[in-house]
Image (spheres, rainbow, N blue to C red):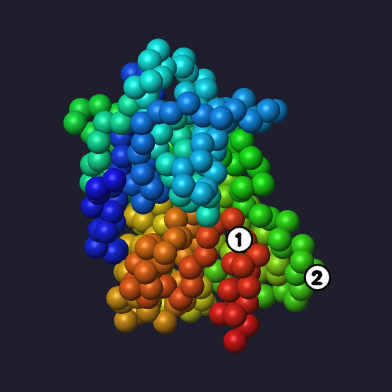
Amino acid sequence: METGILLESGTNELEILEFRIGKNCYGINVAKVREIISFREPTPIPNSHPCIEGIYMPRDEIITIIDLAKKLNMPPSPNPETDMYIITNFNNLNVAFHVHSVVGITRVSWAEISKPDATLNGNGNSIATGIIKLEGHLVVILDFEKIVSDISPETGLKVSDIDRFGERERNTKPILIAEDSALLGKLICDSLSKAGYTNLQITMDGQEAWDKLNEYKVQGTLDQKVQLVITDIEMPKMDGHRLTKLIKDSSAFSHIPVVIFSSLVNEEMRRKGEALGADAQLSKPEIGSLVSEIDKILWK
């Protein structure tokens, strides 16, 4: 798949792959997309989740196929032979999503993406992470991590990994977290608190985190309020790469360690994070590894 995925790091831009289920338009960050292929008949797996169509095996790997229309409670395609599979990679998983058609790729700024309000996401069960207007119509950016973890909960945040740390000494050094998912933000805070980190502040995107840092700088309380930043990458308004760049390029903030904790941490994204000065980068399911990295930074 030819894309401009190698965007300059820290520009707060992303590329959206737009696709359709029925007449509705949806989007996915191209950074999660490995390839797009034509529909092929899957091999069904007995007793699997109703939204799993089956598997197919290109080369020497098995890829699970999720029927996105069924997951979204929408009618099946009338002409499946013309449908497409979007093969993705995130959270160290390769998953195919069955869609009805692929529209194309558009480069946008995270600042252009609106976060769904409480009427759409009040119960934490929404699978829409953002909404953007492209060429006069609305495109809903879907939360593919939540779609997969709803189907297979063991692929989500591995909060049970915290149990191996046992009882630990409390650490009150302040940590600022940028995470746009309210559910994941709570799970991260609960996990870190269980691991002994009790001074946690959560913000809903990179812009809010950046505003907090500047507020504390003006107040003269920066080092008392923030000694570590943990950030997701994909967030409306300002993404984690942009936040990392702003922090590390500023003489006022560059001493603050930044840990990127995201489902998008792969080889290419890791290189981008390193170029921006991130102190550590971890894939989002590995909450135990996150605690270990925080230990290295805050128990020096």
Residue 139: give x, y in percent of width and height: 32, 32
Report the residue that reaches farthest toward the right: 167
State the residue in front, 31 or 107.
31
Please report whichever mark, 2 or 1, sits nearer to the chain's N-terminal start.
2
Disc 1 residue type? Glu
State the residue in front, 21 or 255.
21
In this image, 47 relative to 108: left or right? right
Q: Residue at x 52, y 60 (%)?
A: 283
The answer to whether residue 116 of the structure is visible from this angle is no
In this image, 102 relative to 150: left or right? left
The residue identified by callout 1 is 286
**What label sits on residue 167 in the rendered view?**
2
Residue 275: give x, y in percent of width and height: 33, 73
Report the residue that reaches farthest toward the top: 78
Secondary structure under the numbered disc 1 in the rendered image: loop
The answer to whether residue 240 of the structure is visible from this angle is yes
Secondary structure under the numbered disc 2 in the rendered image: loop
- Quadrant where the image shows the N terminus: top left
Q: Nearer the viewer, mark 2 or mark 1?
A: 1
